[in-house]
Amino acid sequence: MLLLIHWKRCLSPLLLFAAFPAAAQAAAAPPAWRPNRPVELIVATSAGSGSDTTARFIQKLLAEKKLVEAPVNVMNKPGGGGVIGATYLTQHAGNPHYLLVTSPSLLASHITGRSPIHYTETTPLAQLGTEPVVFTVRADSPFRTANELAERLKASPESLSFSIGTTVGSHNHIAVAQLAKAVGVNPRPLKVVAFGGSADGIAALLGGHITVVVSPSSGVWEHFVAGKLRVLAAAAESRLGGPLASVPTWKELGFPVVSANWRSIVGPKGMTEEQARYWDGVFAKLSALPEWRQALDSEHMENTYADSRGTRELMDQQYKAMTSTLSDLGLVGVTKQ
């Protein structure tokens, strides 16, 4: 009897452990990943740029709404058309404390050969907003409608000049190429001038040196509201809101012209699924904030939030489409894929 009691006493801890394996494993499991040091939000352009403004507002909301436990610092790494900032990110492979605010330039720079960094060398985490490209002329331009512009482009492409802002191969340049192709014109000989920014192109338009400005709507908004410029068409899937609701899309007019500037967040390559899920949760909450939606409205951007998987799928699609259009322009350089 004593032996039986002793045997049961010895076995009971084992029986208890076996009876509650889930509780034992939960106690031993490490906590879910979260930042344990300051987070760097990298901007590949100078202070005051569109990406910089976006990054600093993200930083402000993450802190105010306590969406991230660790401090978030904005780090400007301008130069090389975004190459310096992207390179800085890739130097921290596997470290989820480094994030880059980026745009279609991440894809275009690699396609055109300006950057050796392919988007697959990053971990796409979120798309936060999209700003469609618009085609704008002076208020006294002979072009009253988008169809009139398309007809002139088809009949006499050499008579037109386009400002695209920033760099050749940009989303603005792609919109011009798409329209040219839609009317049956070779886009390569077109007179396309890449200014340092939309403001410089608008100044040239107002001065009579350029026929059409092709840019995100925020670039022309002030002059449009003042009555100095006329927006003919938007390179969007559907009409824009507010005063621009009266502006048709190229698509509804029968021209497959869809191009936009978007703001996305990517991390370095090598992040774990758990780390990506953490940032999915953070940016999903950010995109739902009323303050964030108001900020997008003020910048004339659409809230097109997508999580890490959706952002990867978007970049896959965009890379193929941009490669095709930039090939038509003769701008494809040495690419890895």
Image: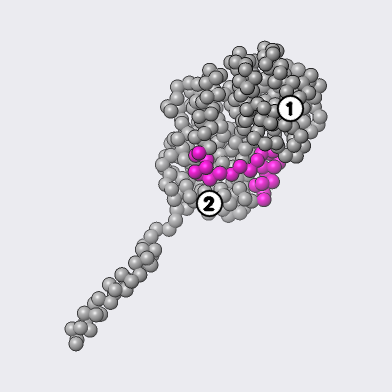
Residue 92 image-quadrant placement: top left
- Magenta segment's dominant SS is helix
- Magenta residues, start to end: 290-313
Q: Secondary structure at mark 2?
A: helix
Q: Label 1 amino acid?
A: Leu
Callout count:
2
Where, quadrant-wise, is the C terminus in this rendering? top left
**x and y, in percent, of residue 121 in the image:** 44, 35
Residue at numbered disc 1: 232
Q: Residue at x 65, y 26 (%)?
A: 255
Q: Residue at x 65, y 40 (%)?
A: 302
Residue 303 lies in magenta, yes or no?
Answer: yes
Residue 243 image-quadrant placement: top right
Mark closest to the chain's N terminus, 2 or 1 = 1
Residue 211 lies in magenta, yes or no?
Answer: no
Please tell me whether mark 2 or mark 1 is closer to you in this view.
1
- The CA span between labels 2 and 1 is 39 Å
**x and y, in percent, of residue 128 in the image:** 59, 42
Q: Residue at x 73, y 25 (%)?
A: 146
Q: Label 2 amino acid?
A: Gly
Residue at numbered disc 2: 281
